[in-house]
Amino acid sequence: MSRVIVIGAGASGMMAAIAAKKNGNDVTLLEKNEKLGKKLFITGKGRCNLTNASDINSHMNNLMSNPKFMYSAFNAFDSDDIIALIEESGVKTKVERGNRVFPKSDKSSDVIKALKTQLDSLGVNIVLNYEVKSITKDEEFKINDGEYTCDSLIVATGGLSYKSTGSTGDGYKFAKQFGHETTKTYPSLVPFNIKEDYCKELQGLSLKNVKLSLLKDADWNSEHYSGLIESGIYQIVYEELGEMIFTHFGVSGPLVLSASSFVADKMEDGYKISIDLKPALDDATLDKRILRDFEKYKNKNFNNSLNDLLPKKLIPIIIRLSGIDEYKKVNEITKEERQRLVTLIKNLEFNIDSLRGYDEAIITKGGINVKEINPKTMESKLVPGLYFVGEVLDLDSLTGGYNLQLAWSTGYVAGSSIY
């Protein structure tokens, strides 16, 4: 039996403590906040998208950094395992669109209660409002000059996103202290600031069932070159159907957050987004649809002819960008002008200025270099008995429950490898 201390009572830390205690260890969980799972409480807009019910291949494919590193951990503890653990604590779950798993109650607090039930029933010593300021090691690890000591130490302090929840980069400091390298960090799963001023006019507009394409300036000689986009030569970096929303600064929503994972560390390369407002219609079908509307409103001005086709807030912007006189009679609009309208509706472009900051980022991209971590145990290859789990590592996934599965899986293999 080992004396184990886990620093950080987020998803990965609580899971690590549960797994370590199930192995018969003496486990203490230290948390700087006044309660457990503070960041977990706000995930999924307070509903807690606790995992994704897809197979391991899907989880691997949605990993943005170092996917091979997670192969053993996903095999040791997958989405079925976390669902079973939560449900055996009395919290029923449900699967929604995209295989996203939520508590049936839609309350993240129920997931935290389930984990607290596990910790309490196992007898994990939980210490709240306790900040770890220093760690030293000789024969054992000493926390804050020996206030706590242990044989094995698990660092589960998170990254830099949502600092109000306690993620202030402490784990990077501890890792560097013990000789570990950290890769550069960036906010990820985060909204975009947009260059175009007219984006502000769309504030509050939510779009559903649109296709967002993330485009990057492409080199003719690039091996990743994927083809010609009408407005120039661009590499399609990311493309997906779903939802997004316009804000006072730019764009946000599920499509945008996922797209941000592809640009977090490459913003200097130059990116734009293209929105297909009618992805279910090809150009010819959309043209026929517009002709039907024009026939219906043939005696109207152009600015009064698009209400059946587009959200009201978007119409003035589309008219302006189309170059068609807003007071032109619909029956006077030429085929060429109509084609411009079709192209615009299928390819509404915005230039990305920058990413929003860590305070709005769901996760941190980058972290402790996983080459220095044993993927089967999460133990440091440099310091025996030292483990790192969750967001503090250089691991990140797309939205949809995939990031929390990283936390559960890494926490589980760390805790379960200690005897």
Image: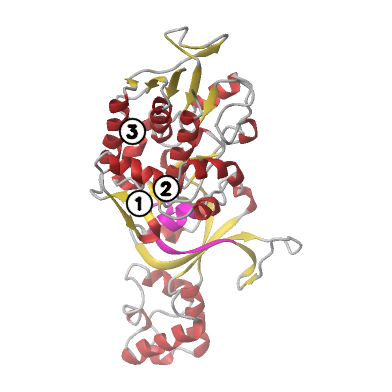
Give the amino acid type for the residue marked by disc 3 in the picture. Lys
Contact between labelled residues 1 and 2, with CB atoms less than 8 Å apart:
yes
Q: Nearer the viewer, mark 1 or mark 3?
A: 1
Give the amino acid type for the residue marked by disc 2 in the picture. Ser
**Disc 1 secondary structure class:** strand
For residue 101, which numbered disc appears in the image? 1
Q: Residue at x 69, y 61 (%)?
A: 224
Q: Residue at x 45, y 19 (%)?
A: 4
Q: Nearer the viewer, mark 2 or mark 1?
A: 2
* Residue stretch in magenta: 237-258
**As rendered, which of 330 and 50 lies closer to the eye?**
50
Gap in Å between the C-alphas at discs 1 and 3? 19 Å
**Up-down relation of residue 103 to residue 2 (above or below):** below
Q: Earlier in the sequence, mark 2 or mark 1?
A: 2
**Up-down relation of residue 301 to residue 315 (above or below):** below
Q: Residue at x 46, y 67 (%)?
A: 211
**Disc 2 secondary structure class:** helix
For residue 38, which numbered disc appears in the image? 3
Few, some or many residues within 10 Å of mark 1 (<14, 14–19, 20+): many
**As rendered, which of 99 and 265 lies closer to the eye?**
99
- Point out residue 14 in the picture as x, y percentages from the top left corner: 38, 31
Q: Earlier in the sequence, mark 2 or mark 3?
A: 3
